[in-house]
Amino acid sequence: MPEDVRPTPRLAARAARTGGSPVREILALTARPEVISFAGGLPAGELFDTGGISAAFRHVLDEAPRQALQYSTTEGDPALRAAVAARVTARGLATAPDDLMITTGSQQGLSLLATALLEPGDTVLVEDPCYLAALQVFSLAGARVVPVPTDDDGLDPQTLDEIAARERPKLLYLVPTFQNPTGRTLPAGRRAAVARVAARRGLWIVEDDPYGELRFEGEPVPHLGSFPGAEDRTALLGSFSKIVAPGLRLGWLRAPAVLRRACVIAKQAADLHTSTLDQAAAARYLAGRDLDAHLERVRGAYRARRDALVDGLGEALPEGSRWNRPDGGMFVWASLPAGYDTAALLPEVIRYDVAYVPGAPFYAGPADAGTMRLSFVTHPPEEIREGLLRLAKTLRAPRP
């Protein structure tokens, strides 16, 4: 290299230490149409209300094109915020439009919260296992992530309290309803106890709720922010990705005023505002279509798909395996017997044109190599049953 030319500076340490998403990498490997994939949490495309969404965009472009194609406020479309506030209120958490901001998917909302709340070295508590993209966000923020052990009902509040007393975290992140990756739901009693721990230990709570409206059975459980002690310290994230369509890239963030204002400033620095056109179309869609009726159809289809997966796992997984039966959401969590490594087995499984996500990447602490996440929403029941037959060719084959 000539003496007057120097190499470019290195990447930031946070970029170097944060790995890519194994889920995205697996999706790239399984994009072939013949693959039956239980890997990605991809909503069923054939269930999208394409007619209603198309009509909403046409209406906006016909009736108010100048506004829909113009810059907008960072906080978001007032009509959309009002519609979201009404839905959140109807689910038991009183919310005004000014309590909300619209984000480019709930994933951006999480990134904005990390920017507003976390200094490098701050401690974040997460469920173990945890939503993978949240671990990426916290890694990029330079946070120290500490896992909280879980059982079949989610994290244990007493263990949470002990870890919070020892680690002095700034926030707790969790997906309490139909969790990703496990599909578990945190019971109301534990939610109340988590709220008390957060108040006693001085924590922010981030409740990520992309799946709450996909309940097939059982009674809804109140949002964490509705429990005493959590009202003024909880940020709630929501999304249209699972209830309308992920391609809209629309989500929302509900937070106390001081935190919401900090997130608005962070969003101004990130992208100024979320797509004006998409927001206007979503507001029109909610005003002109019966989303609840659409969701009834989606939930019915997803319930049949969950049943097909769960009822067939006994013939697909090795003897001694365990799995759950979630009351909603998109995922089943399975554990194979000792000695199985789902990551090592995946390449062989893919040879039969079927896939899952190994559980290890979802752990912030020591991983259980025998775990896997299985999504049941992408394929209809008959394809799910065929996929299970393909899984069995590897997972129930004689082991050396």
Image (cartoon, rainbow, N blue to C red):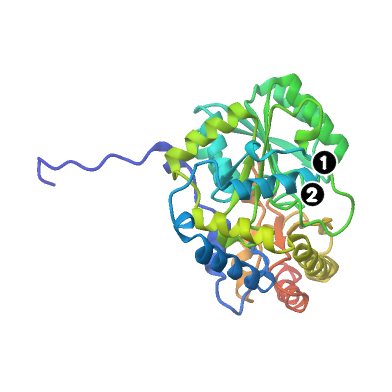
Q: In this rendering, which labeled residue sits more in front, label 1 or label 2?
A: 1
Amino acid at circle 1: Pro
Question: In this image, 236 relative to 336: left or right?
Answer: left
> Which residue, as the protein is rendered here, is positioned at the far left?
3
Residue lying at 76% horizontally and 62% vertically, measured from the top left:
295
Q: Residue furthest right?
A: 218
On-image quarter of the C terminus = bottom right
Between marks 1 and 2, how big is the CA–CA gap? 15 Å
Q: Position of residue 75 (x, y in %)?
A: 54, 41
The type of residue carrying mark 2 is: Arg
Residue 364 shows up from this direction: no
Q: Residue furthest front?
A: 63
Q: Quadrant of residue 390?
A: bottom right
**Would you name the residue on which mark 2 appears?**
184
302 horizontally vs 135: left or right: right
Vertical relation: 320 (above or below) 134: below
For residue 135, the mark is none
Secondary structure under badge 1? loop
Q: Nearer the viewer, residue 216 or 85?
A: 85
| Quarter-of-image position of residue 231 | top right
Q: Position of residue 221 (x, y in %)?
A: 84, 44
Tag 2's secondary structure? loop
Q: Would you name the residue on which mark 1 appears? A: 222
Residue drawn 44% across the image and 43% down it: 272
* Neighbours of disc 2 within 10 Å: few (<14), some (14-19), many (20+): many
> Is residue 53 at least partly visible in the picture?
yes
**Does 140 sit left or right of 78 as displayed?**
left
Work out whether 312 lies above or below 266.
Answer: below
Residue 135: give x, y in percent of width and height.
Answer: 58, 42
